[in-house]
Amino acid sequence: MKTVYHLMKTVYHLMKTVHHLMKTVHNLMKTVYHLMKTVYRLMKTVYHLMKTVYRLMKTVYRLMKTVYRLMKTVYRLMKTVYHLYFHVLYGHTDMRRLTTGILSEKCVVRRFRRCSKVIECSYTNLDSVA
């Protein structure tokens, strides 16, 4: 009878140990669940941060593109002013020919088209004026 009693006592301690083990596993699983939840929230935050950074980069790209176009326009404007200044004030050969009646207005407009935008022009031949 004593051996049965010891055997039952051993089984009882074994079951108690298993119970504690199961409790520990349960607590560990809860901790893992909370950790996974935290990782999910962190990943979601990182995703939103990356999305915001992407939008910011896109905006910066558009801004740089606009600045490039503005610089290009300023360059063209400066080039136009330079050409007009050079051709008009220093009496470029085309202007001398125009004033002496050698070239037609059509020819002069064609040569100055790269310098400035011409909206209207009449194609009068000035050769007969001189």
Image (tube, rainbow, N blue to C red):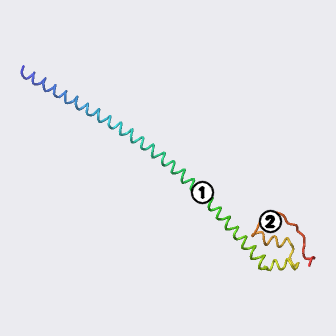
Say which mark, if any, is on residue 63.
1
- Mark 2 sits on what residue? 118
Image x and y of residue 53, in percent: 51, 51
> What amino acid is at disc 2?
Val
Instruction: Using residue 123 as the reference point, say whether residue 75 is left or right of it.
Output: left
Rendered residue at 92%/76% (across/down): 129
In 3D space, how far apart are the residues under numbered discs 2 and 1 (Cα atoms)?
Answer: 30 Å
The residue lying furthest to the left in this view is 2
- Front residue of 105/2: it is 105
Instruction: Using residue 80 as the reference point, say whether residue 106 is left or right of it.
Output: right
User: Looking at the figure, which quarter contains the N terminus?
Assistant: top left
Instruction: Using residue 3 as the reference point, say whether residue 83 is left or right of it.
Output: right
Dot 2 or dot 1: first in sequence order is 1
Rendered residue at 51%/48% (across/down): 52
Mark 1 lies on a secondary structure that is helix
- Front residue of 66/3: it is 66
Image x and y of residue 38, in percent: 38, 40
Image x and y of residue 68, in percent: 62, 62
Mark 2 lies on a secondary structure that is loop
Q: Is residue 123 above or below residue 37?
A: below
Badge 1 density bin: few <14, some 14–19, many ≥20, Cα 10 Å: few
> What amino acid is at disc 1?
Leu
User: Looking at the figure, which quarter contains the C terminus?
Assistant: bottom right
Residue 103 lies in what quarter of the image?
A: bottom right
Rendered residue at 61%/59% (across/down): 65
Residue 25 lies in what quarter of the image?
A: top left
The residue lying furthest to the front in this view is 89
Rendered residue at 76%/68% (across/down): 116
Image x and y of residue 117, in percent: 77, 65
Say which mark, if any, is on residue 16.
none
Q: Are marks 2 and 1 in contact (CB under 8 Å)?
A: no
Badge 2 density bin: few <14, some 14–19, many ≥20, Cα 10 Å: few
